[in-house]
Image: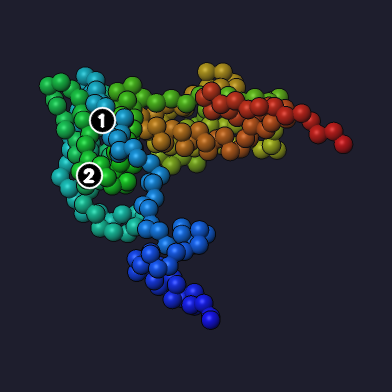
Amino acid sequence: MLAPSRVKVLERAVSGNATAVTLPAFLVPAFQTAVPRRPFSNTTNRPSKLGRTPISIPPGVELAIGEPRVKKDATSYLRIPKRTVTVTGPLGKLDLEIPPFLTINHDETARRALLSIENNEIKQQMEMWGTTWAYLNRHIIGVSEGHTAILRLVGVGYRATVEERPRKAQYPGQKFVCLKLGFTHPVEEPVPIGMKASTPQPTRILLEGINREQVMSFAAQIRKWRKPEPYKGKGIFVNDETIRLKQKKIK
């Protein structure tokens, strides 16, 4: 007499008739109820450490939060209502655009600002929370104390001077950073408006400005002419930048 087909055996086992039919041991895991998988992380969403920290506003610095205005986003090309925060201080004025889901609670008596977002579960809001805090803090420091960058020229014959070029100037009184870096011609970099450049030593360049992004961008623009190389350690170093020297290649 032929044994029942495998299909019928499986159907009986699934229907719950365990007394009549028993499954082999290697088929039992396939017909067990699915156990929910353990999530990757069980930790709850925590607020941003930077975002929840109040920003202290020094004397002489004022914050002005504007009304929301619809502007086209440069990345997604969507029309998003954004507000502009104007930071005014003894050294100048800077503007910062903040997203619509972020709120700034400005306490004028305590001279501090606290940032908050609408929903802690949304990843984009959590990311922009700390980022906006950092931008606002840099703007406050910039208009009150200013930002600086020191460039070190390391190499035989490397020199730097700050001179005027009236024929090449884009605005009245613009100065140029003239570099001698071993090329057949000197390199001239125009100083952006709102920034100051000086050379306390022939191998040192001091950049000053209220916008840290502009200062570091101009420093990177100068650095690209002679990036630090790892064999002799020559090049243009920004602030505390270092490089690990390598051994020479021996054939």
**Where does residue 69 sit, x and y in percent of width and height?**
19, 50
Circle 1: element type = loop
**Where does residue 172 sit, x and y in percent of width and height?**
40, 36
In the picture provided, is 7 more to the left or to the right than 91? right
Q: Residue furthest left?
A: 109
Location of residue 19 (image quadrant) = bottom left
> At 66% across and 38% down in the image, what residue appears?
185
Location of residue 229 (image quadrant) = top right
The type of residue carrying mark 1 is: Arg
In the picture provided, is 135 more to the left or to the right than 228? left
Residue nearer the viewer, 123 or 221: 123
Residue nearer the viewer, 245 or 164: 245
For the residues bearing labels 1 and 2, Cβ distance under 8 angstroms:
no
Q: Residues within 10 Å of mark 1 (few under 14, many from 20)?
A: some
State whether residue 168 is above or below residue 91: below
Residue nearer the viewer, 172 or 140: 140
Mark earlier in primary sequence (1, 2): 1
Residue nearer the viewer, 65 or 35: 35
- Tell me, yes or no, if residue 44 can be seen here: yes
In the picture provided, is 219 more to the left or to the right than 231? left
According to the picture, the residue beneath numbered tag 2 turns out to be 119
> At 53% across and 32% down in the image, what residue appears?
177
Please tell me the numbered disc located at residue 199.
none
- Tell me, yes or no, if residue 205 can be seen here: no
The quarter of the picture where the C terminus appears is top right
**Where does residue 83 sit, x and y in percent of width and height?**
21, 44
**Where does residue 114 sit, x and y in percent of width and height?**
21, 30
According to the picture, the residue beneath numbered tag 1 turns out to be 52
Q: CA distance from mark 1 to mark 2?
A: 14 Å
Numbered disc in front, either 1 or 2:
2
Circle 2: element type = loop
Q: Residue furthest front?
A: 1
